[in-house]
């Protein structure tokens, strides 16, 4: 079993925590966009409170461990590995709870290049524990606004994990899916689940728009987020998102495997 100390060392070595690749400039830009309620930064959250850039710096310092000094404008962001570990422990506890109830779960990612395997391991373990891994709206069209304009994507499931692909992308091999922050895929999936009369998820696990969009609709939602994505952390602070794990969400996909092993062991879901 991976010890807490070993995982902490891995977080730092893989730059999942500690000094990360995300720049302070990039994070501050996201905070300004969020404070202006730009949909590109809100990604499905409808904030109840007014959030200034200074407020967001303070929140992210508390939740992630970034510098709380508003005059700190350049360099790399820093994530406190102990905050990441504490959030992973809470993540495992929530997984264990839904597994004990054999609850229905929905998993989705806007980072399929990096995080598909991370979520797929949880989908496999939860399914083996008797949970229903939902796949509503498979193949459904989703029109997402991108920097290139409105683009049509298809909602698909790979190993129990939802993602979107451009229609021209092949379903097998090659392109693992498109990167998106949009909450529209999870809204589409949840609407389809409701329309079908089938089970609704007791827990949604995802990132970006998946966790924010589901939480805003009243579903228990949790997942990882980087320092340049304040929306999930705002959702957590306002009680909309259940749990956010601070970590770099764009490192090599195999660097996340020790995290899944640690979480599944703690949740007693290792196969």
Image: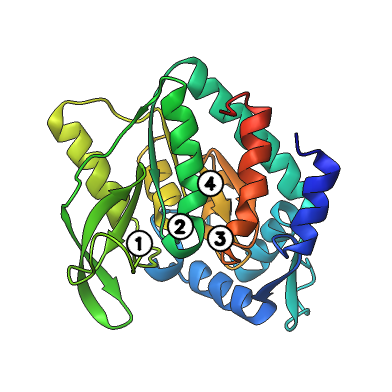
* Residue that carries the numbered disc 1 in the rendered image: 182
- Near-viewer residue (174 or 243): 174
Q: Earlier in the sequence, mark 2 or mark 1?
A: 1
CB atoms of marks 2 and 3 within 8 Å: no
Element carrying mark 3: helix
Query: Relative to residue 116, is residue 133 depicted above or below?
Result: above
In-image side of 252 versus 137 (left or right): right
Rendering coords of residue 81 (x, y %): 78, 53
**Residue 125 in sight from this viewpoint:** yes
At 56% from the left edge and 28% from the top edge, which residue is drawn?
A: 271
Element carrying mark 4: strand
* Residue that carries the numbered disc 2 in the rendered image: 208
Q: Earlier in the sequence, mark 4 or mark 1?
A: 1
Label 2 – label 1 distance at C-alpha: 7 Å
Which label lies toward us, 4 or 3?
A: 3
CB atoms of marks 2 and 1 within 8 Å: yes
Which label is found at residue 223?
A: 4
* Residue that carries the numbered disc 3 in the rendered image: 253
Label 1 – label 3 distance at C-alpha: 21 Å
Label 4 – label 3 distance at C-alpha: 16 Å
Query: Relative to residue 266, is residue 62 depicted above or below?
Result: below
- Near-viewer residue (173 or 194): 173
Q: Give the quarter of the image for residue 192.
A: top left
Q: How many numbered marks, from 0 up?
A: 4
Q: Earlier in the sequence, mark 4 or mark 3?
A: 4
Q: Give the quarter of the image for residue 268.
A: top right
Q: Residues within 10 Å of mark 2 (few under 14, many from 20)?
A: many
Q: Residues within 10 Å of mark 3 (few under 14, many from 20)?
A: some
In-image side of 98 versus 21 (left or right): left
Which label lies toward us, 2 or 3?
A: 3
């Amino acid at each position: 079993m991976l010890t807490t100390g070993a995982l902490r060392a891995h977080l730092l070595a893989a730059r999942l925590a500690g000094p990360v690749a995300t720049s302070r400039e990039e994070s501050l830009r996201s905070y300004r966009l969020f404070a202006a309620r730009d949909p590109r930064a809100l990604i499905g959250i409808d904030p109840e409170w007014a959030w200034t850039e200074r407020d967001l710096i303070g929140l992210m310092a508390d939740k992630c461990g970034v510098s709380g000094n508003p005059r700190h404008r350049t360099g790399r962001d820093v994530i406190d590995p102990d905050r990441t570990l504490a959030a992973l422990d809470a993540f495992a506890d929530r997984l264990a709870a839904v597994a004990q109830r054999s609850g229905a779960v929905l998993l989705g990612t806007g980072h399929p290049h990096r995080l598909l395997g991370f979520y797929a391991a949880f989908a496999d373990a939860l399914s083996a524990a008797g949970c229903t891994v939902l796949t509503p709206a498979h193949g459904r069209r989703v029109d997402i606004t991108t920097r290139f304009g409105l683009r049509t994507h298809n909602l698909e499931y790979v190993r129990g994990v939802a993602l979107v692909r451009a229609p021209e992308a092949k379903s097998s091999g090659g392109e693992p899916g498109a990167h998106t922050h949009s909450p529209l895929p999870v809204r589409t999936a949840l609407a389809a689940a409701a329309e079908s009369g089938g089970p609704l998820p007791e827990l949604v696990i995802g990132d970006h728009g998946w966790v924010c969009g589901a939480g805003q609709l009243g579903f228990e939602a949790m997942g990882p987020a980087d320092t340049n994505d304040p929306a999930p952390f705002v959702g957590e602070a306002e009680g909309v998102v259940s749990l956010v794990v601070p970590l770099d969400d764009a490192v090599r996909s195999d660097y996340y495997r020790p995290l899944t092993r640690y979480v599944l062991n703690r949740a007693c879901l290792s196969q």
